[in-house]
Image (tube, rainbow, N blue to C red):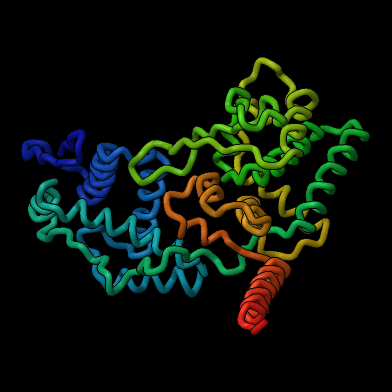
Amino acid sequence: MQVDEVGRVHLVESVPLLRPDERVVESMLDGWRNQQLSRNLQFDTIDQRARCVRRFIEHSNEEPWNWTPAMVEEFSADLRSIHHVAHATLRGYHAALRAFCSYISNPDYGWDLVCEQLFGTHPAQVFHDWNTARHIQQYDGQPTKRPYTKQELDALFEHADDEVARIGSTSRKGWQAAYRDATMMKLSYGYGLRFNEVRHLQTVDFARNPHAREFGRFGVCKIRYGKAHRGSPPKPRSILTVWRWTPPVIEDWLANGRGDPDCLDMFPSERGGLVVESTLLRRVRRYCTDVGIPEGVDLHSFRRSYATHLLEDDWDPRFVQDQMGHEYASTTGIYQFTSDEFRRSTLRSALDRTMHQALHSAEEGTPK
């Protein structure tokens, strides 16, 4: 049995298969991998999908050609009731498994003939609209997630700076890592960055903005690893610096914290690679606990806060959309969490404007 570069299977009848069920499953996964590579999907995405398939096989204790819709429902119930996965996570499992079933049940790839010859049955699509989680609304993230308030950010950043000073004064290891993580938090908020965007920053990704010379050589931040569309490379964009405190943060880190001046990476790890998400996430959670910030914020909350605070400060929504790298304004609207004070001031301004117009119209209508 051979699988070509696009996922088609060819059964060589003269070669007997040892443990055919295991061999066919592994060949199916290899063929599906080739098929996804031809669609230019990311390697991490392909590997994650393969893990979903293996997990379903382990749960159902059946090979793919014996799967049934009832097994799908049992698997979904287990994920929801026992493991308490989020709706988006469940939908991700369903999407991966549906794609796998579509591949092995497509006659173009030949798995139906192989399974008929070896096992007397054939694979079928068992993941349908009526037994899988659907993507109905644009945003289905957890409702507990929110942006930081400005007061929370001030407290968090001040505590992060204090920790850098405290660790540095004790001559303990970890001073540079604490300094690095504090700077990453500030730039995540200062430019509204996702974690993967900030971790890939390099010193050459900053440039001057001729229309905002006060920011010096840090007037523009060029993002090379923006969120990609499915099957596409990372989407680049440029973000204009908007806050005056941002360039001094970068300059101070480059001069006093980063270390090796010949290294291009802005935030190298202690071992020379790039920082992993769990490292920064643990520190953010610990600092939030230290300063008494309640649950509901995470790394992505820096990005939420960036959009929210710009909109609260009356920046143009289209400008915020471009800064965030959103293709549609409705996507930016997801991040538009406005504070109670902003809502009150907006309402008061609208009411005052309405009253002024009414009084002005009444004065114009008064006979002289």
Residue 92 spot, x, y in % from top left: 40, 58
Count of numbered badges drawn on the protein: 0
**Quarter location, residue 345:** bottom right
Seen in the picture, residue 206 relative to 160 is either above or below; the reply is: above
Image quadrant of residue 204? top right
Could you tell me if residue 157 is visible in this image? yes
Tell me where residue 319 appears, x and y as whole percent.
54, 47
The quadrant of the rendering that contains the C terminus is bottom right
Q: Is residue 263 left or right of residue 45?
A: right
Residue at (63% x, 77% y) in the render = 364
Q: Is residue 280 above or below residue 204?
A: below
Name the one closer to the observer, 362 or 119.
Answer: 362
Q: Residue at x 43, y 54 (%)?
A: 328
Task: Classify residue 123 as left or right of residue 265.
Answer: left
| 214 left or right, relative to 6 | right
**Residue at horizontal 66%, vertical 15%?**
262
Using residue 228 as the reference point, say whether residue 305 is left or right of it.
right
Q: Residue furthest right?
A: 169
Q: Residue furthest top?
A: 262
Quadrant position of residue 317: bottom right
* Depicted 193 relative to depicted 55: above or below: above
Q: Position of residue 10 (x, y in %)?
A: 11, 39
Farthest residue, direction front? 368
Image position, residue 240 (x, y; %): 60, 37
